[in-house]
Image: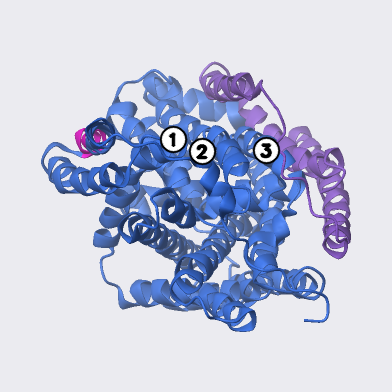
Chain colours: A purple, B blue
Amino acid sequence: MSIMLVLTIILGALATALFVAGYFRGTGNAIRNHRSTVQPSAAVAEEKSYGWSMAFAVLAAAALIGSLGVSPAFFYLPPLLVIATAAVNGYAFFLDRDG
Amino acid sequence: MDASTLKLSSGLSAGLGISLMVGSGLVFLLIAMIVKRYLVRDTHDFIISNRQIGLGFGVGTVISVWTWAMAVMMSSAMTYKFGLSGLFWFVVPNGFAIMAMIPLARMMRKRMPEGYTIGQFAHVRFNGSNVASGVVTVTMIFNVLLEILVNLKGTSVVMSTVFPIDWRAATLITIVTVCTYSYFGGLWTSVMTGTVNTWMITVPAAIVLVAVFDQIAGGAPAVFAAVKASNPDNLSIFQSEAPAAFGISLAFGLLASVVADQTFWQKVWAIRADQVTRTFLWAGAWFYPIPICLGMLGLVGLAYGITPQMIGGDIAAIGPYVISHLGLPAVFIVAYVLVILAACYSTIDGASTALSSIVAVDIVKRYFISATESRLFYITKLSMLFGGIIATIIVLSGVDFTSLVLATFALKTAILVPLVLAILWPKTNTVGFAGGVCLAILIGMPLREIYGELVGTFAILGISGSVVVIAALAIPSQFDMDRLKAVDAIPVAQPGE
C-alpha cells in the first residue's frame, strides 16, 4: 500500500467523520424544524456574486482537466478533491445553522 | 502496460452482489422509517418537505440526483474515446447545467413561493391553458421515466458484468429495493438517502482510483507515459473532435435535462428560500471532481491499449472492465460497485419522488379537486411506484427504448427556451409557448434525423425560441407575474389529523 493510498484513506476517514457529524446534526435540525410551528422565511437570500463563483468553478474544473495532460503528479488531485466534496457536504450542515 | 495481462478478478459471487444491492437498500429503509415517523404527516411534507431542506441535505441530494449511474461510466467512456478533450466536454457542461438553474430558481422562489411543480407554474402562467401545462407535464413524466429506465439498465449491466448475476434478476432486485424504501417518506427519504449516496459516490471513488494507480506497475507516471506514447493528443483538452461529435449538443442537452426536469424544480421549492442559491452553486461546483476522478479510468484503459472488442463493444463498460480486470483486492471492486449503486439508487428515488409531486399537483389536485387529503396522500404514495413498474416492464421486455429516448430528447430540448422565456419574459404567451414547442419538434426532429444531432439541436432551440418571440410581437400581452403568488398551497395537516 503506497503512501498516497494511505493518505487518501486517512483523508477519506476524516471527511467521513465530518460528513457523519454534519448528517446527524442536519437530521436533528430537520426533526426540530418539523416539530416547530414556525414556518421558514420565504425571502430568497441576496447573493449578487454567484455569477463570479460560477465562472470560477467552471474555469477551475477546466484547469483541473487540463492539468492532467501536463504531469502525472496532477493525477492525484481529482481523488483528493472528490474527498473534499464529501467534506464540504459535511461542513454545509454546520454552516447552515437551521438546516 | 499490456492489455493481455488483464484478467477478471475471482471471488466475486452472486451472493456478494445481491448482498450489496439489498444491504444498502436495508440501510436506506431504516432511514425511511425514521423519516416516516418524525418528518412526514401529510402530502405537503411528502412532496415538498415543508420547504425545510437546508444547505447540507440540499447539496447532498442535488449532487447525488445529478450523478447518474450512466454518467459515472460515461465520464470514463468519453475519456477512453476522445482522451482528455472528451472528459472536458463531458464534465464542464455537467456542473454548469446545475449552476445555471440559480437565476431561474431565485426568480421562481420570489415570484411563486408556494409552488410545487413546473407544470403548475405553466398552468398559472398561461391562464389555465391545458395545452401549455399538458406539454410541460408530459415532458416531465417522460423525463422521469427515462431517468429510471436508463439508471435501471445501467445498474443491471454493471451488476451482471461484475458479478455472475442474471441482468433480469439485477433489474428486479434494484427496482424492488429502491421502491421499497422510497415509498416511505417521499422527498425527505429521497433527500436523506441521496445525501448518504453522495458520500458513497465520493469517498469510495477516491480510494478506488488511487488503489488503481497503486496496482499498476509504475503507478500514475506509467499511465501518463503510456497514453502519451500511444497518442499525445489524448492528453490535450483542445482536440476538436469531441465538441463536434458530442460536446456541443451534450451541453444544450444537459441544460435541458435540468431545466425541463421536475426532479430539480421540486428541490427548488423544497429547499429553504435562503439556501436555494448557495445549494445549487455548491452542488454544481463540488459535483465536478466526481466525473473527473472516475473519468481517469478511461485514461487507464487507453494506457493498457484495451480495445472496444475486449469490453464487448460498449465503451460505457470501460470503467467496470478496468476495475474488475486489474487484479484489485475485492474490497476495492466492491467499493466501485457501491459507487454505481449509489448513483443509480439516488437518481431513481429522486425521479420517483418527482413523479409523485406531478401526480399530486398536476393531475389529482387539478382534475379531481374534491379528493380529500387522506386520499391524495394515499394516491401520491402509490404513484411513487408507478414509474418504477413501467420502467421495469420496458427493461425486462427487452424492447428497444430508442423511441422513448428520442421523444424525451425532442420534448425537453423543444421546451427549454420557451420555458426559460416564460419564467423571465412576461410577454411570452400561450400561442408562442405551445406553438414553439410543437413546431420545433415537427421541423427540428426531421432535421436532426437528416443532418445529425448538432444541427437538429440548434434547429429545435432556434425554432422554439423564434416562435415565442414572433408570437409575443404578433399578439401583444403582458402577464402579471404577481399572479403566481396566488398559487394555493396543499393544506398542511394539523396535529391529530
Q: Image quadrant of residue A14?
A: top right
Main SS category, magenta section: helix
Which type of secondary structure does the marked residue at label 1 adopt? helix
The residue that mark 2 highlights is B295
The residue that mark 1 highlights is B90
Image spot of residue B87 (x, y percent):
45, 32
* Image quadrant in which the N terminus of chain A is located: top right
Position of residue B26 in the picture relative to residue B172 (left or right): right
The label nearer to you, 3 versus 2, is 3
Mark closest to the chain's N terminus, 1 or 2 = 1
Amino acid of disc 2: Gly
Which residue is situated farthest in the left direction here?
B450
Tell me what residue is drawn at x 42 percent, y 56 percent. B123
Q: Are marks 1 and 2 in contact (CB under 8 Å)?
A: yes
Range shown magenta = B453-459
Chain letter, disc 2 residue? B
Which type of secondary structure does the marked residue at label 3 adopt? helix
